[in-house]
């Protein structure tokens, strides 16, 4: 796939802008049908797409087929959400001469799509966070158009998926240019800088995300940059939980941090456990890893970044190796070890993501140390508590909720379902915003509110009219009014 020239990038963005203008006013059922058409296209072309993805990523067909099903489900779920119209937040304040602060004019507010959204795909999820992943799907659901910058780790899949999406949208009657694909580093930079681009969705490295964030903020018109930059995803094990199910916790931990060769942004990179002695922990880890077959990482560049990160953490004073790994093309997992006293003296140990099959175990002396250790963490996508029945570590929970987008109780962070209450985000450096990139709430990132004052009813957007022709939920004079359920997509 050739790099996109500046002229071709400009043409793609301008076509996307015209498509946005043509499609922004369509009714919700029509917009939902476009998402469903993409889902049907992905399902129809699925075998060919999975074959290409397997060749380019080495992730294996079972994983890729599951990921494609997730992307299809996500589109269907978003179509259902669009039809319901709750994301519009339609709010009506009728004129009120007796309003408490003086006469109130007729005011009506509704969320409207931003415009052209630039999306940068991820390497580690070639379907779920790439061409038609969460950012692209939620932007289209909001009524925006999308220009997607292909990831160099799977260029053939990106091009093939984009062809499927474009064909599906054309068959559904969507405006030409509603979705397009560009390639190359220069195209990505020009995409962020283009004056017709109104928001960016990004999943990738902290360094790459920060560079693009600065681009987005230094434009003459700064734009929102919704960057997911990864996380270390600390897990805290209480003393009682460790005493009751130590071996089970370690076995599950191994399964989670090695899943997908540790190439998940939710991989548990830190495990805090009571002081036990490294030899006993090593014994359980080795038994849990027995039979594990490593596979290639997604790219040579990622393998080199993994080697540098692990070497850096391993080089800190007080860090030793519980399970020796390798930096071969198919790297064996690595488990490092340190103590709470070393971490308290050197908090940087908790802030280096090792993207790959490695993790760090920290032994603490007393459970009362956990809140102080948690406060050393930077923003996290997830944090996890492993507890025993009846435990209520409220202070620790409060701290974790303050630094995390998702807090788990007796679970493991790998595996992010697409649903209504999901939140996949977190304070910086996990992300660059307080929004989610997974779940139906992701749609709201690409909307902005507009209020209409004293407008003739016939000129108002349909969701703000008194007769409510689209049948969306409306908040009228402070009270929500719903309508009978509309037919929704099968999800």
Image (tube, rainbow, N blue to C red):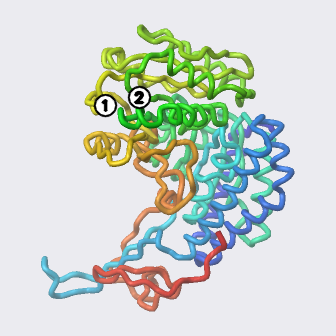
Residue at image location 57% in from the left, 76% down from the top: 83
* Residue 427: image location, x then y, percent: 39, 41
Placement of 379 over or under 224, stated as above or below? above
Dots 2, 1 in contact, CB < 8 A: yes
Residue 116: image quadrant is bottom right
Residue at image location 64% in from the left, 43% down from the top: 121
* Residue 74: image location, x then y, percent: 63, 60
Work out whether residue 228 can be spotted.
yes
In terms of sequence position, does the residue under pointer 2 or pointer 1 come before the other? Answer: 2
Q: Nearer the viewer, residue 409 or 353?
A: 409
Q: Which residue is mark 2?
A: 272
* Residue 398: image location, x then y, percent: 29, 44
Relative to 347, 58 lies left or right: right
Placement of 491 over or under 372, stated as above or below? below
Q: Secondary structure at mark 1?
A: helix
The circle on residue 370 is: 1
Q: Residue furthest bottom?
A: 467
Disc 1 crowd, CA 10 A, few/some/many (<14, 14-19, 20+): many
């Amino acid at each position: 796939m050739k790099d996109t020239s500046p002229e071709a990038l400009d043409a793609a963005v301008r076509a996307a802008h015209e498509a946005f203008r043509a499609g922004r006013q369509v009714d919700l059922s029509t917009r939902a049908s476009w998402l469903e058409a993409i889902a049907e296209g992905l399902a129809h072309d699925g075998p060919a797409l999975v074959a290409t993805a397997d060749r380019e990523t080495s992730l294996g067909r079972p994983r890729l087929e599951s990921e494609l099903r997730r992307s299809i489900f996500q589109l269907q779920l978003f179509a259902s959400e669009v039809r319901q119209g709750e994301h519009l937040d339609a709010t009506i304040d009728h004129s009120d001469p007796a309003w408490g602060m003086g006469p109130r004019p007729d005011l009506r507010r509704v969320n409207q799509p931003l415009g052209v959204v630039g999306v940068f795909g991820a390497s580690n999820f070639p379907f779920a966070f790439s061409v038609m992943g969460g950012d692209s799907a939620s932007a289209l659901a909001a009524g925006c158009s999308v220009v997607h910058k292909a990831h160099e780790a799977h260029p053939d899949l990106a091009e093939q998926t984009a062809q499927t999406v474009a064909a599906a949208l054309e068959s559904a009657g969507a405006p030409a240019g509603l979705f397009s694909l560009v390639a190359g580093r220069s195209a990505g930079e020009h995409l962020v800088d283009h004056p017709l681009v109104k928001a960016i969705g990004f999943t990738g490295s902290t360094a790459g995300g920060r560079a693009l964030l600065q681009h987005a903020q230094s434009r003459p018109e700064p734009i929102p940059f919704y960057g997911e930059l990864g996380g270390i995803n600390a897990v805290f094990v209480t003393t009682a939980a460790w005493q009751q199910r130590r071996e089970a916790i370690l076995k599950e931990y191994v399964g989670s941090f090695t899943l997908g060769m540790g190439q998940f942004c939710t991989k548990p990179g830190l495990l805090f456990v009571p002081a036990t002695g490294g030899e006993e922990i090593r014994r359980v880890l080795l038994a849990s890893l027995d039979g594990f077959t490593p596979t290639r990482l997604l790219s040579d560049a990622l393998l080199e970044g993994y080697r540098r990160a692990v070497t850096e953490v391993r080089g800190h004073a007080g860090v030793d190796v519980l399970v020796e790994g390798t930096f071969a093309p198919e790297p064996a997992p690595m488990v490092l070890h340190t103590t709470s006293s070393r971490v308290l003296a050197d908090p940087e140990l908790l802030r280096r993501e090792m993207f790959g099959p490695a993790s760090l175990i920290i032994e603490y002396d007393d459970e009362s140390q956990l809140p102080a250790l948690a406060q050393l963490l930077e923003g996290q996508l997830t944090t996890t508590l492993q507890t025993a029945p009846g435990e209520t570590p409220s202070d620790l929970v409060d701290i974790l909720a303050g630094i995390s987008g998702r807090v788990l109780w007796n679970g493991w962070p790998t595996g992010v379902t697409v649903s209504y209450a999901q939140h996949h985000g977190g304070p910086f450096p996990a992300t660059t915003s307080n929004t989610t990139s997974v779940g139906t709430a992701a749609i709201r990132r690409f909307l902005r509110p507009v209020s209409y004052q004293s407008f003739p009813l016939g000129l108002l957007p349909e969701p703000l009219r008194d007769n409510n022709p689209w049948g969306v939920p409306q908040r009228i004079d402070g009270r929500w009014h719903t309508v009978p359920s509309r037919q929704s997509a099968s999800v």
